[in-house]
Image: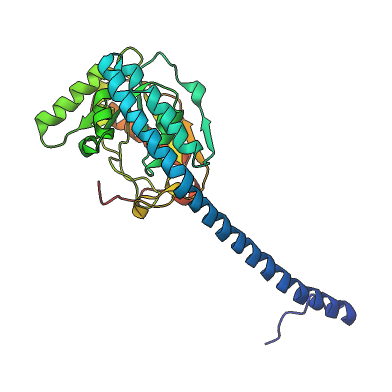
Amino acid sequence: MLGKPSKNKHQPLSTMVQDTSNNTDQRPQRKEKGKAATCLSRLSTFFYRLYQIFIAAPVLLVCTILCAVVTIIGSAIGGAHFWGYYPAMIWSRLMCWVMLLPVRVEGDELVDRKTSYVFVANHQGPYDIFLIYGFLGRNFKWMMKKSLMNIPLVGRACRSAGHISVDKSGPKAIHHTYEQGRKVLRNGISLMVFPEGSRTFTGHMGFFRRGAFQLADELRLPVVPVTIDGSFDVLPRQRGFNFVTWHPLRLVIHSPIYPEASGPEEVKRVMQTSYDIIMKDLPEKYQGMVENPDQ
């Protein structure tokens, strides 16, 4: 069988030899550039970790203690809505700034400061807390796992601030959680929920639970989908307590989804719409649902 004719059939032999020589000369140069880039990356990672150990960690530990103490004392004196939000907002911004993590917020203008919403977001990692608390720009209460209330000092501050612990031990406990939510969602105070219930292991979204959407349906409140991007790359769940990896963070606040009806079908519609909207703004590598074993 005959092969295809060479594209260089009419090219002078001297030119072909010269091209081959040029390709040979470029290979070592590309290898050297690749080695230099790898060396530079490792060096920057090394110094970034030294910075985290000797500068960032001590500063942020002090900030965390101060934030918790101020929240507890301020809430005890009065004005838990104020003291439960603003000190934590400053603390969360410092957690990003001191770690030198750039943050971009999109869609901030789409929500009204005087309206109560149920915000729902994907849950990529620990830095979700700092990204939302620091940059959402709305006074809200968390609906959080009951176990988080047991963290020394921080748990006490969360209780003082009026955040809602989710107790799934039985129907009465779940009903009590909903009652707390109803009391919170008024006078422009919103609720922030991670409908997945736990952090992702892969960067992809798991399925949503219905609780937050049922509460929004009962109270006839708009749901605001929020996309978190970058938190998984900064500190993924499986890494545990470890060094932070430098990576940009992005918080996308989408348009509110207003109720059109009421009942199970409306809950299903809003939940699916929220899921699709959040998913659409994730990077392509994290597109698609991956079931989370914790769910």
Indicate the quadrant where residue 26 lies: bottom right
Instruction: Between residue 259 and residue 114, name the one nearer to us.
Output: 114
Instruction: Between residue 245 and residue 44, name the one nearer to us.
Output: 44
- Identified at 60% across, 63% down, the residue is 39
Give above or below for 178 relative to 46: above
Instruction: Between residue 258 and residue 33, name the one nearer to us.
Output: 33
Indicate the quadrant where residue 174 lies: top left
Q: How is the image coloured?
A: rainbow
Question: Which quarter shows the N terminus?
Answer: bottom right
Give above or below for 191 relative to 79: below
- Identified at 53% across, 43% down, the residue is 248
292 horizontally vs 112: left or right = left
Residue 197 percent across, percent down from the top left: 27, 40
Residue 181 percent across, percent down from the top left: 24, 23
230 horizontally vs 177: left or right = right
Residue 251 percent across, percent down from the top left: 47, 34
Instruction: Between residue 76 and residue 41, name the one nearer to us.
Output: 76
97 horizontally vs 292: left or right = right
Outermost residue to the bottom: 1
- Identified at 42% across, 38% down, the residue is 60
Indicate the quadrant where residue 102 lies: top right
254 horizontally vs 197: left or right = right
Mark count: 0
Residue 79 visible in rendering: yes
Residue 101 percent across, percent down from the top left: 52, 41
Give above or below for 208 relative to 76: below
Residue 270 visible in rendering: no
